[in-house]
Every structure is written in C-alpha cells, then in structure tokens.
Amino acid sequence: MTATFALTSNGFRRPMLAVMAAAMLLPALSGQLLAQRGPDKIADVAETVIDAVVNISTSQRVEAAANRPGTPRQQDRPGQGQGPGQSPQVPPGSPFEDFFKDFFENRRGGPGGPGAPGGPGGQGENRSPRRASSLGSGFVIDPSGLVVTNNHVIADAEEITVVFNDGSRLKAELVGRDPKTDIALLKINPEKPLKAVNFGDSDKVRLGEWVIAIGNPFSLGGSVSAGIVSARNRDIQSGPYDNYIQTDAAINRGNSGGPLFNLNGDVIGVNTAIISPSGGSIGIGFAVPSKVVMGVIEQLREFKEVRRGWLGVRIQQVTDDIAESLGLKQARGALIAGVDDKGPAKPAGIEAGDIVIKFDGRDIKEMRDLPRIVADTPVGREVEVIVLRKGKEEKKTVKLGRLEDAEKAKPASVQSDAKPDDKTVVKKALGLDLANISADLRKRFKIKDSVNGVVITGIDQNSAAAEKRLNAGDTIVEVAQEAVGTTDDFQKKVDKLKKDGRKLALLLVANPEGELRFVTLGLQ
C-alpha cells in the first residue's frame, strides 16, 4: 500500500492511513448489509426446496350449466372444463384467460354463436354432466409421500393429482382435513423417496423477517416470490382459530396450500388467503402458522381427524367499559357469559361473570386467545384455570372434554324478534322499560322457564341502551354481578352504584332462549 501524507500547520507530515482505512470499510460494510438483507440467499433457498413444492390438481363431475335454469352456461366460465366448441381449460385469473376466451368464443363462435353449444344449431341444451377442475399448491413433508395443502383446495374433489416440478404426476388420497384451520393432508405412493421440507418455529418469526412463497399462482407452477413478515397473530374473521402470519410476498390465486419459507428453508406457514379488490396480489397475504399446522397434521396422521379440547363456556370480549365496571385496571382475559350445564367448566366451579386470565399456564390476553388455547389442549387433560371473580384471583381445575360440531365455544350473542308492549311497563331506568317477569311476559316473549330476572319491554332509541343491541324480551339477570328479581331490586342496585361513584353498570342479560352476555350501561 502506498502511504499518503498531508502537511500540518507546523510543517510536519501526518499519515492519512486511518482516514483511508475508514473510508475503505464503508463499501465492505455495505456489502455485508446487502448480503444480510436477503436477496442473495433467497435464490439458494429456492433452489434447495423447490422440488418439494407441488401443484395440486382436482376434478369433479358437475351438472352442465345449460341444464340448470337461471345459470350461465359453463363455457362462459373459463377453467370449468373443455370440450368441442369450448375454450381450453384456463384457471380463473390466468393471464391467458382473456386471450383464450376471445379467440375460442368470440372468433370461433362462442356461447350463443352459430354452431356453438347452446347457440343456434348447437347441442348445449342436451349436454350431460362433465368434469370441472381447480388448481392449488402443496408441499411434501415426508419422503414417503405425505403432502400438505389447504382444505379449500381439495374440498368436494373426486380426484386429486399431485404434480411435481419436473412434470411427473401421482394420484393422491385424502388422509384427513380440518376445515376450521383450512388444512388438509394427502398421501401419494412414489416409486422412490421424495424431496421433503421441514417445519420451522413460527413463534420465533419476527416482523420484517424475509420470507419466500413458492406455489402455483394462476397455474404458473414453480413460481417464487419474496417479501417480509408484515404482521403476526392476524385475525381476519375467517374462523374461531384465526392466528395468521401476514406477508407482503406476492400470493395470488393458485398459491393456496403452498409453503411460506424462512431463509433457513424451513416452512413457517401455509399460504391460505389474500386481501385484494382485484383478485391479484396487493401485498397483503396470510399464512397459517407452522405451529398450528404441525398440531393439525399430527392429529390427522393419527386419527384422520382433529380432536379439540372443550371447556363448555360461552365467552365475550372484556371491553374497556366492562373492565371499568368491574374495577379492573386494564381490559384483559375472556369473560364467561354462560356455562354449559353438561360441560367440563360446570363441575369445576367456573361461573358466568368470571374472567379467565390464565389457562394451563398460558396467559389469556384477550377473548380470542381462549378458544385457540383450549382447542390445542389434549382431550381429557386436567388443567389449571385462573379466573378473576369480583376482583380476586381464584384457581379452578378442569378436565377437558372434546369439542364436537354441536359444542362450539363461541362469543355470546343475543337475538329476539319479540315486540315491546308499553302496557306492561312498570319502571323506566337507563333508557329501558322494565317489568317484573310474569307468566304473561313469558308467553308473549317466549322466555324459557329457566330464565329469571327483570324483563326489558321497551328501549329508548335515543339512549345508550339502543346501541348495545338490547332487545325487548331480553331479561336482566344480574346487576354488578348480583342477582335481581324485581324492578325494585334493579333500581336499588343502580342507585347504589351511583352512590359509590361508579360511571357504568355491568348487566348480565339473557335472551329468551337463555343465552347470556354482559352489557355495560352508563349511569350518567
């Protein structure tokens, strides 16, 4: 290296090596940062795992549309099969969809055209049922031939074919599926061991982490896209166990069931859904976390179905108003709005009004945490549940049952079509017309005999009560977690809350069927 010097004010020369060295470090550091941010490694990962990613092709027999009154003809919908006079089979959304539709239908006599099926001289009205197909993605998790995909990809399919990156095809059998998480497990019988991928730990995924999506978008198999994790624990209201990883990696129709990889080549999610006004990617895609998928797959392999734990409660969100009415510092946990008489929670001593803050050692931060954690807990296990009851923590031991289709833990809801009758009103309070329960009111509003309390017969539409979805025919069972039997009881408890300086009253309300929920009403 040639040394460089500069003259100082007193005539001495000082070396500039340190300055030059620092300057030379900048490009080196920039190169390291570029290498760490992902693009170079993405190619290596994609090359390693792409042979384990497959296309899923399904088919089923469908009734010819021309034979179904009031429905469009099948050839009006590309991707619904192929026959004489029809355009080639092109999945909806394919970039070739418009081209084939224009060429085969508009130029060669499409639906309604001369000689076309369904048109003059055609035979469309007598067409027999034929095959429809759909396409999605999947990935191999076991060299012996186990393939994971989305349930909606294979739903209602009569035939399932797995198509590999080299073009080879194998028929697949359905091992089991779970509509609640939209996961399905398939089995194929290869002649030799297959390339398989491993699951990673989705709990360790960080916001901003680089991820890779590989799949079959628009039937263009073996497509790789990359992006970052933009959110975790996302709830898109698709089911009771929503807990999606959100990514801006391009995910389109056909990517469903495909894997979302980290830069170690591990599957951290199964691409399942997108939000898009156009049908194409706008950078908001969702993947089922690998931790959820692994639990589902384990049960599908063992039982051919998913067996979930069941607590036997109805729950609702602890809002800020409810928290304030109960004297809590913050809104947290899942509020028990009702307890199934035949469920595990009943003998364990869990009651309506309890707030579950911890289940089997895991914190319940909000309502939707509880159904997911309970479902993941093995059936028959005894677990410790910590609840808040009137501001104090209590421990309960529950032996979980099994969640059946008819036994769903769901948010409490209220509905009533009964009409109010002002003649029965004996007292007005908090924007409500209230009456003592009676045989006449039970008959009028079809209130079950098991429901007791004060009946709402009318609601001031300009009051806060109207905004809380209260209905005539609902019954107020408790005020501030204390039972009420008459309108006088109700008024005394409301007056006491006002005297104590409370701003909100917590009401336990039952609909005519006896379903319970908590409602807060302002006292001012």
Image (spheres, rainbow, N blue to C red):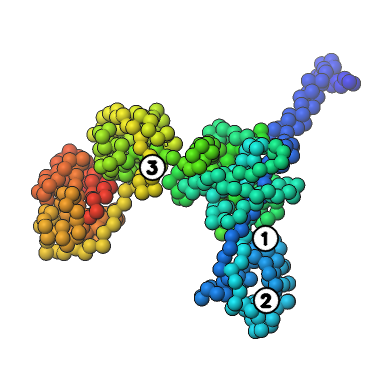
Q: Depth-wise, is mark 1 or mark 3 nearer the camera?
A: 3
Q: Amino acid at mark 2?
A: Gly
The x, y position of residue 285, in whole percent, is: 58, 48
Which SS class for mark 1? Answer: loop
Q: Pointers 1 and 2 in contact (CB under 8 A)?
A: no
**What label does residue 110 carry, if any?**
2
Q: Which residue does the image show at 62% across and 77% down from the upper left?
A: 124
Q: Which residue is mark 3?
A: 403
The answer to which of 83 and 108 lies nearer the viewer is: 83
Circle 1 residues within 10 Å: few <14, some 14–19, many ≥20: some
Q: Which residue does the image show at 37% across and 33% down from the upper left?
A: 380
Determine which quarter of the picture holds residue 110. Answer: bottom right
Which SS class for mark 2? Answer: loop
Q: Which residue is mark 1?
A: 94
Q: Depth-wise, is mark 2 or mark 3 nearer the camera?
A: 3
- Of callouts 2 and 3, the N-terminal one: 2
Q: Is residue 418 left or right of residue 39?
A: left
Q: CA distance from mark 1 to mark 2?
A: 19 Å
Q: Amino acid at mark 1?
A: Ser
Q: Is residue 192 left or right of residue 374?
A: right
The answer to which of 413 and 2 lies nearer the viewer is: 413
Q: CA distance from mark 2 to mark 3?
A: 51 Å
Q: Which residue does the image show at 23% across and 46% down from the upper left?
A: 508
Vertical side of 108 occupied by 156: above or below: above
Q: Amino acid at mark 3?
A: Leu
Indicate the quadrant containing the N terminus: top left, top right, bottom left or bottom right: top right
The answer to which of 313 and 41 lies nearer the viewer is: 313
The x, y position of residue 276, in whole percent, is: 57, 56
Q: How many numbered dots are placed on residues in this image?
A: 3
- Of callouts 1 and 3, the N-terminal one: 1
- Of callouts 1 and 2, the N-terminal one: 1
